[in-house]
């Protein structure tokens, strides 16, 4: 497909409207910042929620034991310090004086419960696999928590960091998501499915008090409507929630500001290895080579992303470029399909596959249409199925798909992403190996890295893991998405992290 035809499909499918300021309502509330999100969070229990909205909003409501810095290293947070007296023991010393939103003091019993309930069946969660090496947790005094491991786990601190596991009150059960209570800078007020989530400033927070008293996250699935809400001033900001063409159109609006920073969010396509066709590695490699990622990047993303061949972000200490690459090559893709025995029929079709996507992201919908045409050119008929996000994510979680397109947000900043996404022990519901990829050599390498405290040895293992994954193509990495914030001029002092979290709302202000 040519760039011109792809651009024509872009405008034919989703025309970008030029919206005026006519008909603006009254002045916005000086105490409420309104964020626009594409879909409702699936589950605001931080032990369960894996989707982007759940994790981002949870990071405002809950605190983790440790927090990642800009170099992907962990720093103290609820744990003011910790020690590792031996490879299988971590001793955490908690910050005194921290209280939950209901006034209850934070103690080691809460930390113990948060970890235990995530992997002992109290809640059913894909995060349970992150604590598979935990043997037991002790709480010898209110401010000391001791985690005993079955064997060394270099990812324990990562799995206790922000975006991974927030600390919940001891005794929190399966229905905790209905009224989540944390220690974070904002406290939960209400949630209406497919409408909004409302948070209020935690006036007793141990952190610096956020300048903005209230946050409202309005669920607006339609891209054009999100743009209109920003232009008329009924919403203050959207991050990574507007089509690139929409962002381009809004740059001329003097009442809006746009900030863009390189991000670690990686867009990818996952393939189901239980599919009768996709289980053949030659078919998966063929699909990867039939997709012109650079064309899609140039025409749909308008330079707001960078090509990806891996899940780990550029510059990561464990990342390698010494892996198999799949540049756009439809001739080679065709040859691989022929070699696999999938000859085209009278209508040119070799077989059908299904791609499921969410309706929450217009660039993904357009991308699917382009990929549909590109796969058709090599004889693969791809049926695109579009669902609202909750239904889509439920199908993804239970493996009801041929292929799906999604984003890793934050989780891919740790090499543990390969265990979470590809280890045999991470098959659902114990992890995010949704494509049912099984490779004993990858399992062995991940276990070897987990048992080591030698970073050079760890990196050797992770390099081999990346090479195996690139060869077997259970996933097709697409691009690293820039973090793009479109906001009204009244929302100021915005500093966006590489992961694209909502942490900037803790320090932003609403100008008069």
Image (cartoon, rainbow, N blue to C red):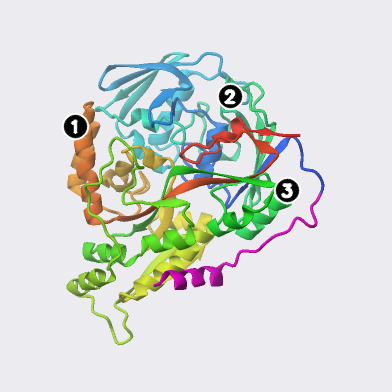
For the residues marked 3 and 2, what is the alpha-carbon distance in whole angstroms? 32 Å
Q: Give 246 or 364, whichever is nearer the viewer.
A: 246
Q: Give 393 or 382, whichever is nearer the viewer.
A: 382
**Pointers 3 and 2 in contact (CB under 8 A)?**
no
Q: How many marks do you count on the picture?
A: 3
For the residues marked 1 and 2, what is the alpha-carbon distance in whole angstroms? 41 Å
Q: Give 130 or 18, whichever is nearer the viewer.
A: 18
**Residue 175 appears in the rendering:** no
**Residue 439 appears in the rendering:** yes
Indicate whether 182 appears above or below 142.
below
Return the residue at label 2: 100
Return the residue at label 1: 457
**Pointers 1 and 2 in contact (CB under 8 A)?**
no
- Mark positioned earlier in the residue sequence (1 or 2): 2
For label 1, the crowd category at 10 Å Cα-Cα, with few meaning under 14, some 14 to 19 and many 20 or more, is few
**Residue furthest to the right:** 26
Callout 2 secondary element: loop
For the residues marked 1 and 3, what is the alpha-carbon distance in whole angstroms? 53 Å
Q: Which residues are magenta?
A: 1-25
- Mark positioned earlier in the residue sequence (1 or 3): 3
Tell me the number on the disc at residue 234. 3
Taking the image as shown, residue 488 lies to the left or right of residue 299, namely right
Image quadrant in which the N terminus is located:
bottom left
Front disc: 1 or 2? 1
For label 3, the crowd category at 10 Å Cα-Cα, with few meaning under 14, some 14 to 19 and many 20 or more, is many
Callout 3 secondary element: loop
Tell me, yes or no, whether the highlighted magenta stretch contains residue 24. yes
Indicate whether 356 appears above or below 8.
above
Indicate whether 455 appears above or below 50.
above
- Mark positioned earlier in the residue sequence (3 or 2): 2
Image quadrant in which the C terminus is located:
top right
Callout 1 secondary element: helix
């Amino acid at each position: 497909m040519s760039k011109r035809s792809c651009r024509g499909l872009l405008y034919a499918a989703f025309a970008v409207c030029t919206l005026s300021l006519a008909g603006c309502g009254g002045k916005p509330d000086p105490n409420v910042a309104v964020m626009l999100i594409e879909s409702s969070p699936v589950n605001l229990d931080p032990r369960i929620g894996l989707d982007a909205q759940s994790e981002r909003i949870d990071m405002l409501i809950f605190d983790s034991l440790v927090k990642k810095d800009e170099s992907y290293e962990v720093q103290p947070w609820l744990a003011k310090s910790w020690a590792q007296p031996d490879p299988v023991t971590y001793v955490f010393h908690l910050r005194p004086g921290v209280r939950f939103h209901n006034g209850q003091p934070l103690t080691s019993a809460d930390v113990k419960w948060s970890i235990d309930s995530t992997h002992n069946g109290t809640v059913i969660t894909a995060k349970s696999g992150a604590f598979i090496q935990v043997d037991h947790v002790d709480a010898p005094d209110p401010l000391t928590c001791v985690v005993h491991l079955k064997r060394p786990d270099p990812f324990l601190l990562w799995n206790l960091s922000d975006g991974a596991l927030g600390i919940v009150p001891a005794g929190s059960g399966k229905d905790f998501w209905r009224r989540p209570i944390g220690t974070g800078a904002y406290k939960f007020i209400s949630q209406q499915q497919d409408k909004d989530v409302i948070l209020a400033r935690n006036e007793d927070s141990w952190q610096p008090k956020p300048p903005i008293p209230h946050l409202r996250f309005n669920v607006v699935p339609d891209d054009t409507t999100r743009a209109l809400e920003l232009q008329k001033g009924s919403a203050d900001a959207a991050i990574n929630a507007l089509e690139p063409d929409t962002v381009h159109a809004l740059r001329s609006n003097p009442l809006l500001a746009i900030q863009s920073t390189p991000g670690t969010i990686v867009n990818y396509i996952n393939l189901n290895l239980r599919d009768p066709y996709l289980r053949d590695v030659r078919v998966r490699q063929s699909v990867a080579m039939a997709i012109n990622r650079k064309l899609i990047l140039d025409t749909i993303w308008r330079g707001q992303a960078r090509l990806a061949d891996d899940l780990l972000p550029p510059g990561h200490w464990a990342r390698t470029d010494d892996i198999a690459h799949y540049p756009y090559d439809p001739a080679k893709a065709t040859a691989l399909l022929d070699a696999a025995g999938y000859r085209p029929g009278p209508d040119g079709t070799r077989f059908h596959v299904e791609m499921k996507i969410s309706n929450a992201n217009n660039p993904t919908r357009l991308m699917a249409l382009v990929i549909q045409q590109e796969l058709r050119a090599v004889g693969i008929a791809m049926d695109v199925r579009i669902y609202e996000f909750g239904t889509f994510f439920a199908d993804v979680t239970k493996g009801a798909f041929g292929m799906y397109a999604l984003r890793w947000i934050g989780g891919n900043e740790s090499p543990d992403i390969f265990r979470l996404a590809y280890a045999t022990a991470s098959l659902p519901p114990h992890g995010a190996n949704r494509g049912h990829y099984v490779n004993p050599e990858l399992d062995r390498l991940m276990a070897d890295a987990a048992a080591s405290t030698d970073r050079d040895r760890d990196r050797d293992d992770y390099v081999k893991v990346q090479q195996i994954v690139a060869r077997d193509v259970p996933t097709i990495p697409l691009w690293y998405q820039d973090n793009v914030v479109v906001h009204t001029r009244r929302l100021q002092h915005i500093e966006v992290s590489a992961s694209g979290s909502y942490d900037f709302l803790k320090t932003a202000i609403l100008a008069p």
